[in-house]
Image (tube, grey):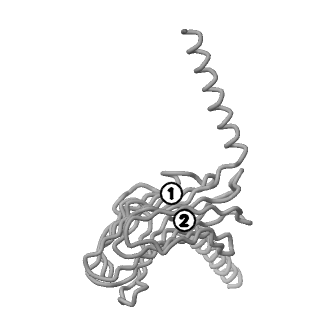
């Protein structure tokens, strides 16, 4: 009987260890997924929506690429392209694009669109980030970018833009203190009436290492000299 009890205890311990391992692996892989979250911040009462890469709501099967559209509160939203690694960039070359986003409204309201991805780093040569947004709006648009290495740090704060055409770029000189880290893009769109339209593209990329820019400049200069010599020889 004692041996049987010991075997049962050992079996239960192994089951617990395996279960914890499965939960850890699943949680890690799910956390590493590209996600787009929609949140009603205009008092419309719409239930928040989360679209995870290759799960419900994503109309594109490629990893690192979200295609989605539908109604959300007083908005009809189409996210034609939300993409990151491995489609563009990589863990060591951080890049995220929230492109061809289109919103039309059936009434006044505000919606927050958040795109996030983790698993970035280590990033050799990283000296900072450059964030940009451009588009047109019948209302207003705010654009914020963050990285999260255990402590969330804002690296871009732009807007409000609109009404009308707009664009903006911000540079951030700094790097995450820990690896891996996450990047988070947040666009907040506000419409004051039905029939308003907003379209925009937003992104965040690493700032190239100064040495890399210098070498690229030398390379272009060398090509220019070679081309000039070829022209002189022909003459």
Q: Earlier in the sequence, mark 1 or mark 2?
A: 1
Q: Is residue 14 above or below residue 122?
A: below
Q: Nearer the viewer, residue 22 or 190?
A: 190
Q: Which residue appears at 65% of the width and 63% of the height?
A: 172
Query: Total label count?
Result: 2
The image quadrant of residue 128 is bottom right
Q: Are marks 1 and 2 in contact (CB under 8 Å)?
A: yes
Image position, residue 139 (x, y; %): 37, 76
Q: Nearer the viewer, residue 113 or 211?
A: 211
Q: Which residue appears at 33% of the width and 62% of the height?
A: 59
Q: Nearer the viewer, residue 56 or 187?
A: 187
Residue placed farthest to the front in the image?
Answer: 235
The image quadrant of residue 153 is bottom right
Q: Which residue appears at 55% of the width and 61% of the height?
A: 169
**Mark 2 burial class by Cα count in 10 Å: few <14, some 14-19, many 20+:** many
The C terminus, quarter of image: top right
The image quadrant of residue 99 is bottom left
> Which structural element holds mark 1?
loop
Mark on residue 23? none
Image position, residue 1 (x, y; %): 67, 85
Which residue is disc 2 drawn over? 117
**Mark 1 burial class by Cα count in 10 Å: few <14, some 14-19, many 20+:** many
> Which structural element holds mark 2?
strand
Image position, residue 191 (x, y; %): 35, 79
| Cα separation between marks 1 and 2 | 8 Å
Image position, residue 138 (x, y; %): 33, 73
Q: Is residue 229 above or below residue 42?
A: above
Which residue is disc 1 drawn over? 84
Q: Is residue 214 above or below residue 231?
A: below
């Amino acid at each position: 009987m004692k041996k049987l009890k010991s075997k049962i205890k050992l079996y239960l311990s192994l089951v617990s260890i395996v279960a914890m391992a499965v939960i850890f692996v699943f949680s890690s892989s799910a956390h590493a997924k590209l996600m787009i979250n929609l949140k009603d911040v205009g008092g419309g009462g719409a239930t928040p929506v989360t679209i995870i890469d290759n799960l419900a709501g994503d109309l594109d099967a490629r990893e690192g690429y979200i295609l989605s559209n539908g109604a959300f509160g007083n908005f009809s939203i189409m996210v034609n392209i939300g993409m990151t690694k491995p489609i563009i960039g990589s863990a060591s070359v951080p890049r995220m694009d929230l492109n061809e986003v289109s919103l039309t409204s059936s009434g006044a309201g505000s919606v927050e669109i958040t795109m996030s991805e983790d698993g970035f780093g280590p990033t050799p040569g990283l000296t900072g980030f450059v964030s940009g947004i451009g588009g047109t709006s019948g209302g207003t648009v705010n654009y914020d970018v963050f990285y999260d290495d255990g402590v969330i740090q804002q690296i871009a704060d732009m807007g409000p833009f609109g009404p009308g055409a707009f664009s903006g770029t911000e540079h951030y000189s700094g790097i995450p203190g820990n690896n891996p880290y996450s990047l988070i893009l947040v666009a907040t769109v506000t419409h004051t009436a039905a029939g308003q339209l907003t379209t925009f593209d937003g992104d965040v990329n690493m700032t190239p290492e100064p040495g890399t820019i210098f070498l690229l400049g030398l390379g272009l200069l060398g090509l220019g000299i070679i081309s000039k010599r070829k022209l002189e020889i022909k003459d």
